Amino acid sequence: MEIKKSAIAGTLESSDVQIMLSTGKNGFEFELESDVAKQFGDQIKETIVNVLKKYKIENAEIRVIDKGALDMVIKARAITAAQRALDIVDTPQWEVL
Amino acid sequence: MEIFSNGRVVSLDEVLQNKEWRQNYQETIETKYPNKVVLGIKLNIPGPIKTNASLKKVFELGWNKIINSLKDKKLEIFFFNLFLDKITGPEGVVVVSGDIIPVKKEMITFESNFLLGRLFDIDVMSKTDKNYQLSRTQLGFEARKCLICEQDAKICAKTQKHTLAEIYREIEKLIEKYMKQDIKNVKIKTVDAALAALLYEVTVNPKPGLVDPISNGSHLDMDVFTFIDSSQALRPYFSAAYDLAVNFKEKDLTQLFNELRKLGMIAEKDMYAATNGINTHKGAIFSLGIFLTAVAYLKKQQNYSIMALQQTIKKMLSELLEDDFKSINMKNNGELTAGEQQFLKYKTRGIRGEAVDGYPVVFNYGLSYLKASTGSLNQRLLDTFMYIAEHTSDSNLIKRAHSVAILTEMKNFTAHYFKLGGSKTKEGIEYLYKLDKLFIERNLSLGGSADLLILTIFVAKIEGVI
């Protein structure tokens, strides 16, 4: 699936993560900002990639500002961002969850 | 204590949606106040229960502390909004003047110094300030530590190092510790206020007929030092009365009063031992004991207000007149107190009547008069004392005068005193010296009014009026 429009989900509050998705050409291109990037950067990216793959997204520019979000929060924010980017907010693919 | 045994479970989605709502809301506020500092204040409670009565109380405690610390820093508060009942937890927003860095430092100090500060999460924002994104570490503070293991909180949260049950236990322990410390502080303050009330009263001068530092009035057997000794001797009584109220579990407050009277009897013995058998504070042991116990009881219930205080006192004393005067007829004349004798002779109810009515002279006259008074503390208390004397049927005065007619005479004295301008005029003070002489000649005193002044001072101290 192609990303139709840039989308954003989440906030800059502590224990949250803000994920911005926009059209990409070369697979998944990450820009990650996080206080715990050293320890958990790969894990954060992996969580997001897994969600995007379930939506069959193959290319995306992904900007992530993490404020110490738990894995389940990252997953939830990634789902919302993907649905907004694919413009399917009104008909969410619940099976993905 | 099980703080997390009740409260609605919220879903992750509700929490995340609320975060987006909050960010939008805060942005609206920031746009509305572009040159001000915006504070977003909330609790930091992991797990699915974000609110209940205890957590709301914790939030309110912190919220009040924050508002006060902002006021102390002379920052102007332009706007605030409190969302106490959100299922995602209580939160609020405050808009203040000033620069973002000092405000942020103040909030970090709150988070680290206030015992419950670790349960708070405060965001400090400003639309126009370039330092918008400054973190604790950039300001030279440590990153927030985990509640349990003192490591970086973010890492513990991320790895879910501790179970929710462990974290809950830690939070409960923290709140319990705070409550205990709070009870201890309130107790010290309250007992101190009672002692101060006794010492202030004896210090106020010149009082007609009463003991003060410059005159023993009509009392040959005591002086100001006797009163200091007596006051000191009553500290254990006040402390015990406080504990009695805090540990009192029954519904019937007349029981609380009955228990207090037992302590009062011990206190009387302590007083006589300290004064070599002279009655300095018998009336105060009775009344101030009641006031202190009622304050302690209400502070424990976190229900204190001036109105609740008067109501509680009334409830404690609802059977007093009936019980006390019932036994009068069984006593020999020699066993009767001054108040009891006067009840039989003049039908005056004395301090018991005043007490049963909830001390109207203290609450309706003394306290409001003291609040509105101006001048030095001695001037304020002196005027308040004379005002109280004007509105009291002082059984000590009646006893010494052997006649109730003295009450009319007393009203003339006080009217003349206030006509002269009271404590702030030379004439007023000279008149008090004259009255003191007159009282000594006729062996009069105003012990009942002095007790009511003590009570007024005590409540004024608790209320922060003086």
Image (cartoon, coloured by chain):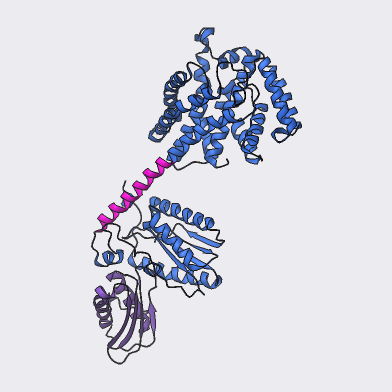
Q: Quadrant of the C terminus of chain B?
A: top right
Single out the residue that lies furthest toward the front. Answer: B214
Q: In the rendered image of this protein, which colour is used for chain B?
A: blue
Q: Residue A4 falls in which quadrant of the image?
A: bottom left
Q: In this view, does B407 lie to the left or right of B175?
A: right
Prevailing secondary structure of the magenta residues: helix
Of B380 and B3, nearer the camera is B380
* Residue at 52%, 36% in the rendered image: B309
Q: Is residue B141 left or right of residue B376?
A: left
* Residue at 50%, 73% in the rendered image: B129
* Residue at 38%, 66% in the rendered image: B140
- The verdict on residue B288 being magenta is no
Coordinates of residue B456 in the picture (x, y in percent)? 58, 33
* Residue at 64%, 22% in the rendered image: B393
Give the residues drawn in magenta, as a range: B162-185
Of B19 and B133, nearer the camera is B133
Q: Is residue B358 visible?
A: no
Q: Is residue B48 left or right of residue B260?
A: left
Coordinates of residue B283 in the picture (x, y in percent)? 53, 23
Q: In the rendered image of this protein, which colour is used for chain A?
A: purple
Of B454 and B57, nearer the camera is B454
Q: Residue B212 falls in which quadrant of the image?
A: top right
